[in-house]
Each structure stands twice: as C-alpha cells, then as structure tokens.
Image (cartoon, rainbow, N blue to C red):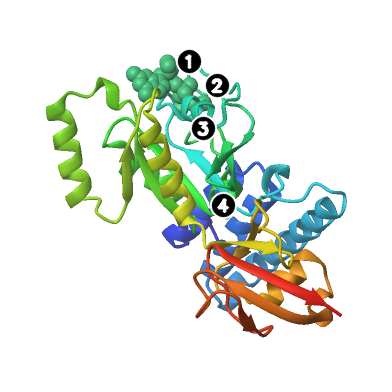
Amino acid sequence: MASTNQSPFYQRAEQEYHEATTDEERIACLEIMMKEVPKHKSSENMRKNLTNRYKKLKQNVVKQKKSGRGGAAGIKKADMQVVLTGFTNTGKSTLFYTLTNMNARISEHQFTTFKPQLGTFMFEDAQIQIVDIPSLPKHDKSLINSTDTLLLVIDNINQIEKAEKYIYRTKAKIILVFNKEDILSINEKRKIEATLKSKYKNYDYIFFSASPTKTKLKELTKKIFETFPIIRIYTKEPKKPASKDPMILKTGSTFKEATEKILKGMSKKIKQAKVWGPSSKFGGQVIGLDHILKDKDIIEFRTK
Ligand SMILES: Nc1nc2c(ncn2[C@@H]2O[C@H](COP(=O)(O)OP(=O)(O)O)[C@@H](O)[C@H]2O)c(=O)[nH]1
Ligand SMILES: [Mg+2]
C-alpha cells in the first residue's frame, strides 16, 4: 500500500520519521504510524514492517540507556526543565545567556545553535535547567516532546501559527515570549497585545528583551517555575533551623515519598514526623506517612 493512501496524520508522521535525528523521535513517529495504518488484510505486511522497525528502535534505546546515554539527545533531565524554541534570530540564545550568564553562541547568522546547550538558573531557591536547541524547523523533536515547559520565543505575531505546525505533539506547557520589546513602538505593542488576548488567549505570554529589568526577569522566571508540577520541601532536625536547599517532589507527593527520595527504604524507619507550613493545621502537627505535602512545607522526623 502506498503511503499516499494513508491518512494525513500518517503521512506527516512518516515525513517526520525520515527527518528524525534520534531514535526517540523515530519511535514517536512510528507510534502514530502504527495507530493510523488501517487494520485490514491488505496492509498486513506494512503493519509487520512498522512493528519490526518499532521493536528494533526500542531495543536500541534500551541499549543506549544502559550505556549511560539516557534521555533525549543524551541530556539528563533535571527535576525542572525548560526548552527554548522558536524560529532563528528571534533571540533564543540571547535569552539563554541572559538567564544563565553563560556564553551561548549569539549571531546575526541563521541557525547558529547547532547542538543543545545546557544551563541552569535559579528561581528563589529552586534550580531550573534550560536547554537552547537549534531553531525551528531544525529543532530536536524528542526534547520538544519530552520537556515540561517550552519557551516559544517570537519576534513577530505570525510566527505563532507557523511554530504550532512543528510543536503540535508536545505535552509541555508553553509560554510565549514576545521578544525584542525594545524595538516595538507603543502602538505596535498595543496591537500585538490585543491579538494575543483575543486570538491566542490560551497562551500565557510575556514581552521581553535582551536587557530586562530585575522585575521583568523575576516575572519570567516565576512564570516558568509555576508551570512545573512540583513542590519544594525543606527538612529539619529537631531544635535546628530548616534546610536551605529544598527537595523537589511531584505535586501531591506524600510524606512517605519525601522520605523515600532522601533514602530508599527510609519510610520504614520513621518513628515520628511533624510538619510546619501550608499543609499543616498548626505548626508542628504530627503526621503519618500518607500525609500529602504542599509547596514550602517543612518536615521533621525521627527514625528508629
Ligand atoms: N533589538 C533586540 N535584538 C535582539 C534581542 N535579543 C536578541 N537580539 C538580536 O537578535 C539576533 C539573533 O539573536 P540570537 O540570540 O542569536 O537568536 P536565536 O537564533 O534565536 O538564538 C542577534 O543579532 C541579537 O543581538 C532583543 O531583545 N532586542
Ligand atoms: Mg541560537
């Protein structure tokens, strides 16, 4: 069966399969193709072929993970990760540099970011990983699809719809960064803002530029932080102040999960536990293992 007889979803996935640069991307494409291919007799060979390719790729990925090359594009994903995306020259690498104070390659030329660049920045006491990847359409699909949050950097309102064609498969939360605010007239900005609020009201957005004020920078890092489904938990020992570095846990985590993150098997050794902060009825409330924690809780416990 020729692929031109296939559904548009199949055809798009097939095209992306051939353009893919990593096995993770190929797997994601094949999953769509396998779902889209008709289940009747005449396509039996095609289905077998797809399944075989799929199995082989899955094995490859397992091998790569075992040899320590885990994660999309070999990047070990941190608890909180944000990926920069958008068309070339919109100022992604400049933004990466602003946030991390590292030297990403910035230039007037197109596609200067060849490989993913990794950096980190802080929001309050939480460390966030940021990745600068090649511009659309030379982006790393597996990273776009697997990350928590995307910063879609644009310097023209028309880029939103064009970008959506490439990133439609992501599960990430998207923050629109309308960049180069410095070169917009008040009138241009007003028009853009009106369009964002009407046509693109599903997106959270922020205007930004290469020399942001402290307040602006904080506004962006806060927006990014708030997209992550995580909570910060501080531990303390009896009669001592709480730790300064929080542990990062998934939203909805229990006290038991917190202790298990500290050390596997630890929850079995808990004798007594107390909590201060948002999830407590009063400071020092005694809690059980099933107690659900909230962001900025402080926990104290004794072990057997
Ligand atoms: N006016 C202005 N130019 C910027 C801003 N941010 C980046 N640029 C310029 O835009 C060009 C492309 O920047 P770059 O960060 O390499 O874009 P990338 O291709 O998206 O990584 C460079 O000439 C930057 O100096 C900004 O906020 N305002
Ligand atoms: Mg760049």
Question: How far apart are the two marked residues, 4 and 3, measured between alpha carbons?
Answer: 18 Å
Tag 4 and tag 3, C-beta contact below 8 Å: no
Q: Is mark 1 within 8 Å of ligand 1?
A: no
The secondary element bearing badge 3 is classed as: helix
First along the sequence among labels 2 and 4: 2
Choose between 154 and 121: the one closer to the eye.
Answer: 121
Label 3, on which residue? 99
Q: CA distance from mark 2 to mark 4?
A: 22 Å
Label 2 vs 3, first from the N-terminus: 3
The residue wearing badge 2 is 112
Please provide percent x and percent y for residue 23.
70, 50
Q: Position of residue 141 (x, y in %)?
A: 56, 46
SS at mark 4? loop
Q: Which residue is mark 1?
A: 109
Disc 4 CB within 8 Å of nearest ligand 2 atom: no
Residue located at (67% from left, 68% from top)? 45
Give amino acid for label 2. Thr
